[in-house]
Amino acid sequence: MDLPSFLWLWKIAAWSMGLAIAAYLLQTVSGGWMYYSRTSRTLRPSWLRYFHYVSGIVMVMLVILLLIIGLVGTVGHYGSLMHSSHFGAGLLVVALVSLSAWSSTKISSQRPWARSLHIGTNIILFAGFVFVSLTGWEVVQKYL
């Protein structure tokens, strides 16, 4: 791909990554609130579950956007993939976010494993976001 400049792509990626991390933090707070209200048997606001779902969908969409930007930017700049550990880190985050989203649709009283899988995946996702952020910074330094 012969694109004149990738600066616009980097800007979109930077905003998307920042918003994905913000969505992850919102997920953490709202998920923690739901967990607390479930275990302590306190009332939770009626909007909380909906908010958790919507912020999760936004996070999934942002991660998919980041995947597309990464593929287009890397192939456009280098002509191929796998030029750094950022590729593997990105795929790891995409897989974890996908597993988290899938497991969230399975949560019910008949499937107690789904909640554990969802929460465990999201705890590991924190490390994935740290890893992809650090390796992404290395990639940005190559372009600059």
Image (cartoon, helix red, strand yellow):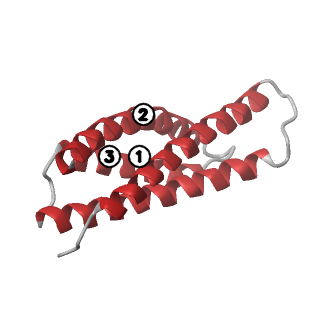
Mark 1 vs 3: CB contact within 8 A: yes
Mark 2 vs 1: CB contact within 8 A: yes
Residue located 29% across and 43% down the image: 136
Marks 1/3: CA–CA distance: 6 Å
Displayed quadrant of residue 115: top right
List the single residue furthest toward the top: 40
Marks 2/3: CA–CA distance: 10 Å
Where in the figure is residue 69, as x and y percent of width and height?
Answer: 34, 62
Q: Would you name the residue on which mark 3 appears?
A: 92
Q: Kindly state the secondary structure of the residue where label 3 is placed.
A: helix
List the single residue furthest toward the right: 43
Residue located 22% across and 73% down the image: 3
Marks 2/1: CA–CA distance: 8 Å
Which amino acid type is shown beneath numbered disc 3?
A: Leu
Q: Which one is nearer the viewer's eye here, 65 or 110? A: 65
Q: Is residue 105 visible?
A: no
